[in-house]
Amino acid sequence: MNIPDGILCSKTHEWVLEENGEALIGLTDWAVEQLGDVVFIELPEVGSVFGKDEVFATIESVKAASEIYMPVSGEILEVNEQLINSPELINEDSYSAWLVKIKPSNYQEDANGLMEYDDYKDEVQ
């Protein structure tokens, strides 16, 4: 698994990677490991706007259903259509299987409180 440089993680196990005024959002490898085999994912519609910490998606595995929280506020620019038809892709590599691409509305402020990946891993172990 290839962890992208510059990734930030939330206490609720989402990751965000900001580049050129856009950000990819996904679930951390630890969260996916806890869920087990993913069987369904519900993603928001393009154009939807979410605030930081709002539920924006739902994921179901053979073990449980979980809500996914927005780590930074913004507007949905794109959803990963591959995951809708093949949700198991998130089990293979949760960092290349991003959930949504957003245009962050207040990235610098929202990113306060997020952790670098190594700090996140230390916290969840």
Image (cartoon, grey):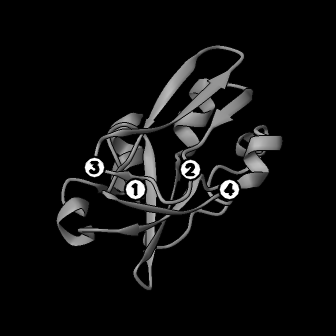
Q: Is residue 52 above or below residue 69?
A: below
> If the image is split into quadrants, where does the C terminus sit?
top left
| Image position of 116 (left or right of 109) | right
Residue on which the image places disc 1: 118
Q: Amino acid at mark 2?
A: Glu
Q: How far separated are the C-alphas under marks 4 and 3?
A: 20 Å
Picture quarter containing residue 105?
bottom left
Q: Amino acid at mark 3?
A: Lys
Identify the secondary structure beneath mark 4.
Answer: loop
Q: Which mark is residue 45?
A: 2
Sequence-earlier tag: 4 or 3: 3
Residue on which the image places disc 4: 80
**Labelled pair 2, 4 in contact (Cβ < 8 Å):** no
Residue on which the image places disc 3: 52
Question: What residue is shown at x 65% (from left), y 14% (from top)?
Answer: 63
Judge by depth and name the residue closer to the eye, 124 or 114: 114
Q: How far separated are the C-alphas under marks 2 and 3?
A: 17 Å
Picture quarter containing residue 37?
top right
Q: How far separated are the C-alphas under marks 2 and 1?
A: 32 Å
Q: Amino acid at mark 1?
A: Asp
Picture quarter containing residue 3?
bottom right
Marks 4, 1: nearer the viewer = 4
Sequence-earlier tag: 2 or 3: 2
Marks 2, 3: nearer the viewer = 2
Question: What residue is shown at x 29% (from left), y 42% (from top)?
Answer: 53
Q: Amino acid at mark 4?
A: Asn
Sequence-earlier tag: 2 or 1: 2
Q: Tell me where residue 48 appears, x and y as whole percent.
A: 45, 53
